[in-house]
Image (tube, rainbow, N blue to C red):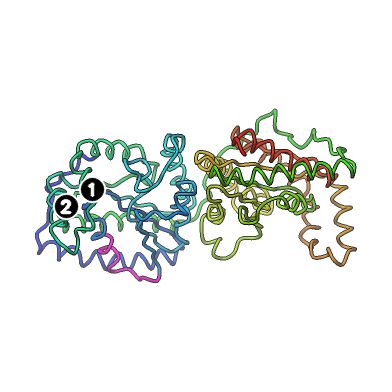
């Protein structure tokens, strides 16, 4: 890719002024149209050290309304970023619909020598390119415009610019050993950049290499690229909306009826229950400190029928944990802000730091259950969500985070009995709503959705655990037992 770029391309001052003015006006108009059509856009600037990323970002911002864009310098790595999956830093900065995010440095930094401060495990680095491509595909499918720009300069030009910075007392701090090493090993970095740009090219978000030896030429080219991509997306939105073809959903036959063979008669005596709670609480307390010491994070997902006992199971799980080491994330209907982002955005924001536990009381699986059954998303959206969810969980697993997923299963009769008891108990009436009663009428539709979910998202690294929950005491112990078993074997803690 890089060798196809003419680094001698340039513009004289007169031509630059003639071309840049109309382009600035057009970009300002397009920003307003993005807001009208609620189109989110990400403009990524990557390139050689001293290739002018800051200068070109400032040039792009000139005609834009500052109320509707955000700029992030990804080179400045904070502790929160280092202690979470690599893509957390980028997914959490994706824009609301109608806004623009500009990034100084891209997600490719994790694959470059030095990694800009990110410390990645060998497994995470080995799988990162696949995770990045999946991340971009998810955003594009959701309607985000991604424009990736790589500023390309020659070795001689880079050396000249670095020398100028070093000789300026006010700017010499901007040059570090990494910048110098890049110029000294220019050919090595050239080959790495060239390979990564070609490999990180999902359809719709290919890299645009811009010759940047001449800054005026680069500015005009960047404006033209951004305008072309935004105009194409706006034109597509203005056409008669059509529902895209839904990807096929093939449910493995052996798992198609995951809930069908569950023995809901399982129970436990009061004495056994008390003894088991004490045992697993002691073990969980020790595990919690082991996780912190070894900087291993855990995501625990609770899904299940209404009134299946998720709250009680979570309470018994957390009773033995240091409250500084975990967070329970109750998931309700998305807020207006959350609806303006990709549906996975609100869950990425809650991913735990290394050494911590995040417990989700309902989760991203709402996409393929309640949103599917109730029609809150299109058929194409919930069908592609199985892959999107698996890709997200894989990125989390690649970081070294454990994922434990529970489906708390009860039968319809048990649910009716629990609903009735709640309705009659003034202290628990808040737990029962008209929506709960209405959902009972869609039991079969939800059961089909749950069976599909378990079959299509139960992976080797993040399998589903179906917990027999007609007996609350049995379910609570079963959850604790599975968490202890997973963390002691899979993470080797304490």
Q: Determine if residue 470 is in view.
A: no
**Few, some or many residues within 10 Å of mark 2 (<14, 14–19, 20+):** many
Q: Could you say where residue 256 lies in the image, as x and y percent from the top left?
A: 70, 33
Q: Nearer the viewer, residue 451 or 376?
A: 451
Q: CA distance from mark 1 to mark 2?
A: 8 Å
Residue at (83%, 63%) from the top-left corner? 428
Q: Within the image, what quadrant is residue 251 found in?
A: top right
Q: Left or right: where does residue 359 sit relative to residue 191?
A: right
Residue at (18%, 41%) from the top-left corner? 184
Of mark 1 and mark 2, the one earlier in the sequence is 2
Residue at (30%, 53%) from the top-left corner? 45
In this figure, which residue is indicated by the disc labeled 2? 162
Q: Left or right: where does residue 362 sit relative to residue 177?
A: right
Q: Quadrant of the C terminus?
A: top right
Vertical placement of 250 versus 318: above or below?
above
First to last magenta residue range? 57-67
**Mark 1 touches mark 2? (CB < 8 Å):** yes
Q: Could you say where residue 282 lies in the image, as x and y percent from the top left?
A: 73, 44
In this figure, which residue is indicated by the disc labeled 1? 179
| Secondary structure predominantly adopted by residues drawn in magenta | helix
Q: Within the image, what quadrant is residue 269 found in?
A: top right
Q: Left or right: where does residue 475 sit relative to residue 65?
A: right
**Few, some or many residues within 10 Å of mark 1 (<14, 14–19, 20+):** some
Q: Determine if residue 166 is in view.
A: yes
Q: Quadrant of the N terminus?
A: top left
Specify whether residue 59 is painted magenta: yes
Vertical placement of 207 versus 333: above or below?
above
Helix, strand or loop status at disc 1: helix
Q: Could you say where residue 199 lies in the image, as x and y percent from the top left?
A: 35, 37
């Amino acid at each position: 890719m890089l060798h196809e770029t003419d680094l001698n391309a340039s513009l004289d001052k007169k031509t630059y002024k003639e071309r840049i003015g109309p382009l600035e006006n057009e970009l300002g108009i397009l920003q307003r149209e993005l807001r009208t059509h609620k189109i989110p856009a990400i403009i990524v600037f990557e390139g050689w050290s001293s290739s002018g990323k800051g200068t070109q970002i400032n040039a792009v911002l000139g005609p834009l309304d500052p109320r509707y864009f955000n700029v992030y310098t990804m080179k400045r790595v904070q502790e929160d970023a280092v202690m979470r999956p690599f893509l957390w830093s980028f997914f959490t900065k994706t824009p609301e619909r109608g806004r623009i995010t500009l990034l100084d440095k891209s997600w490719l930094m994790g694959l470059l020598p030095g990694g800009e401060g990110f410390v990645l495990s060998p497994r995470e680095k080995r799988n990162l390119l696949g995770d990045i491509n999946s991340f971009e595909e998810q955003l594009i499918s959701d309607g985000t415009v991604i424009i990736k720009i790589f500023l390309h300069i020659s070795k001689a030009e880079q050396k000249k610019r670095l020398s100028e910075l070093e000789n300026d007392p006010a700017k010499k701090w901007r040059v570090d050993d990494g910048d110098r090493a890049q110029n000294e090993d220019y050919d090595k970095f050239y080959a790495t950049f060239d390979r990564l740009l070609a490999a990180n090219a999902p359809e719709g978000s290919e890299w645009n290499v811009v010759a940047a030896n001449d800054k005026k030429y680069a500015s005009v080219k960047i404006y033209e690229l951004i305008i072309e991509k935004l105009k194409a997306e706006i034109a597509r939105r203005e056409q008669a909306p059509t529902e895209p073809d839904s990807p096929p959903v093939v449910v493995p036959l052996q798992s198609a009826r995951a809930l069908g063979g569950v023995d809901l008669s399982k129970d436990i005596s009061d004495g056994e229950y008390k003894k088991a709670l004490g045992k697993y609480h002691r073990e969980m307390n020790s595990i919690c400190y082991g996780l912190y010491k070894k900087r291993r994070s855990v995501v625990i997902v609770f899904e299940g029928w209404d009134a299946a006992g998720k709250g009680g199971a979570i309470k018994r799980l957390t009773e033995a944990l240091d409250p500084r080491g975990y967070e329970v994330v109750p998931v309700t209907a998305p807020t207006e802000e959350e609806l303006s982002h990709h549906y996975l955005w609100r869950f990425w924001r809650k991913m735990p730091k290394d050494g911590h536990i995040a417990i989700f009381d309902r989760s991203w699986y709402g996409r393929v259950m309640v949103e599917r059954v109730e029609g809150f998303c299109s058929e194409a959206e919930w069908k592609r969500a199985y892959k999107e969810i698996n890709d997200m969980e894989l990125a989390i697993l690649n970081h070294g985070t454990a994922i434990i997923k529970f489906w708390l299963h009860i039968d319809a009769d048990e649910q009716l009995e629990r609903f009735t008891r709640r309705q009659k108990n003034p202290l628990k009436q808040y737990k029962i709503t008209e929506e709960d009663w209405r959902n009972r009428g869609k039991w079969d539709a939800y059961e089909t959705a749950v069976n599909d979910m378990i079959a299509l998202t139960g992976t080797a690294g993040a399998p589903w655990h179906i917990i027999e929950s007609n007996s609350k005491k049995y379910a609570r112990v079963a959850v604790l037992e599975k968490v202890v078993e997973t963390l002691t074997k899979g993470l080797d803690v304490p």
